[in-house]
Image (cartoon, rainbow, N blue to C red):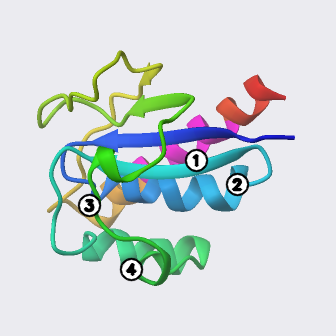
Amino acid sequence: MNKKKLAFICVHNSCRSQIAEALGKKLAGDVFECYSAGTETKPQINQDAVRLMKELYDIDMEQTQYSKTFDKIPVPDIAVSMGCDVGCPYIGRAFDENWGLQDPTGQSDEVFISVMREIERNIIRLVDKEK
């Protein structure tokens, strides 16, 4: 069975979308091929996100992921916007979902963890919808 391609998009592809890609691979890898991208890139993934993903989910995002633009990933079947608080990325078509997540960059671990848990719940919901 061909898995649907699921892309998580935000402007910088350095924090929320990277978390979603990592959690998507771990929680939904049997259902979706997961990608993340932005309309701009950052030199590295947000270090608080990297640290907390290691602590909470035992995922080392720096080993498997990097910041990339939307034109560097396969055309997705499902495109999810992380939230437009820092501007809405333009990908040439409408998003299937907008999760409206706040950007936790520069905030406390509690804020990061809250965003991670929300991403986790949203991914599980997408899996349930697909099955």
Q: Secondary structure at mark 4?
A: helix
Which numbered marker is on residue 51?
4
Categorize mark 4 by other alpha carbons within 10 Å: few (<14), some (14-19), many (20+): some
Which is nearer the eye, 32 or 45? Answer: 32
Q: Nearer the viewer, mark 4 or mark 2?
A: 2
Side of 114 relative to 100 (left or right): right
Give the distance between the C-alpha atoms of the residues marked 2 and 1, in whole angstroms. Answer: 8 Å
Compute the Cα span from label 2 to label 3. Answer: 20 Å
Q: Bounds of the magenta span?
A: 115-124
Find numbered disc 3 in the image and state the secondary structure of the residue it sits on: loop
The dot on residue 14 is 3
Q: What residue is drawn where x is 69% and y is 44%? A: 32
Cβ atoms under marks 2 and 1 closer than 8 Å: yes
Residue named by callout 1: 120
Residue where numbered disc 2 is placed:
27
Magenta-drawn stretch contains 99: no
Locate residue 122: give its quadrant. top right
Q: Nearer the viewer, residue 63 or 1?
A: 1
Residue 85 versus residue 109 in the image, above or below: above
